[in-house]
Image (tube, rainbow, N blue to C red):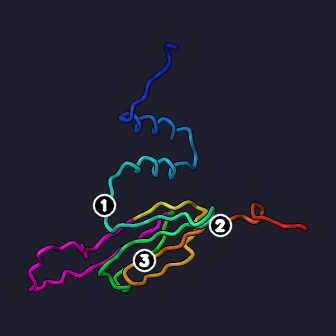
Amino acid sequence: MGNLTRFHTADMPVLFDRIMKNSIGMDDYFDRFMNLHETTSNYPPYNLIQVNNVESRLEIALAGFKKKEVNVYTEFGKLFVEGQKEDTETAETFVHKGLAKRSFSRVWTITDDTEVRDVRFDDGLLVVTLGKVVPEHHARKDFL
């Protein structure tokens, strides 16, 4: 019992360096894990809904945005949603300004077997439908 080493959260980078020396092809997974603690903005607000065991729906509230100002794409196992809003100066005096209407970029990590099936933008709500690709040998087969 004298050889047991205790690790704390501050020791995680050192621990992962030790593990990564003995692993091949796991770099992406370790990088994702190490970057989980990074803080992200809460803007714009979103809902993530589990429709069933193979389909999810991401709803993002984009009040004040037009369809041409929003960009949705996937790259390297990540789903990117970006909104580019032009700064428009108005002569109006706001008593309260609760609608942000600012540019943003949000990123979600998606698994290798997840694909974007549909993207809709209606009435300030962006809806991204995600689905898991079920391999044929895992899909249900009825024989009788």
Residue 133: give its label: 2
Of the two numbered discs 2 and 3 in the rendering, the one whose residue sits closer to the viewer: 3
Question: Label 3: how many residues lie within 10 Å, few (<14), some (14-19) or many (20+)?
Answer: many
Tell me: residue 87, above or below residue 43: below
Q: Residue at x 49, y 20 (%)?
A: 4
First in sequence, mark 1 or 2: give its number.
1
Q: Nearer the viewer, residue 20 or 56?
A: 56
Q: Residue at x 55, y 63 (%)?
A: 50
Counting from the top left corner in percent of width and height, residue 114 is at 58, 65
Magenta segment range? 78-106
Magenta span: chief secondary structure: loop
Task: Please give the residue where the numbered disc 1 appears in the rendered image.
Answer: 41
Q: Residue at x 46, y 52 (%)?
A: 32
Tell me: residue 48, above or below residue 92: above
Task: Please give the residue where the numbered disc 3 appears in the rendered image.
Answer: 126
Q: As shown in the figure, which amino acid type bears the numbered disc 3? A: Leu
Counting from the top left corner in percent of width and height, residue 124 is at 37, 80
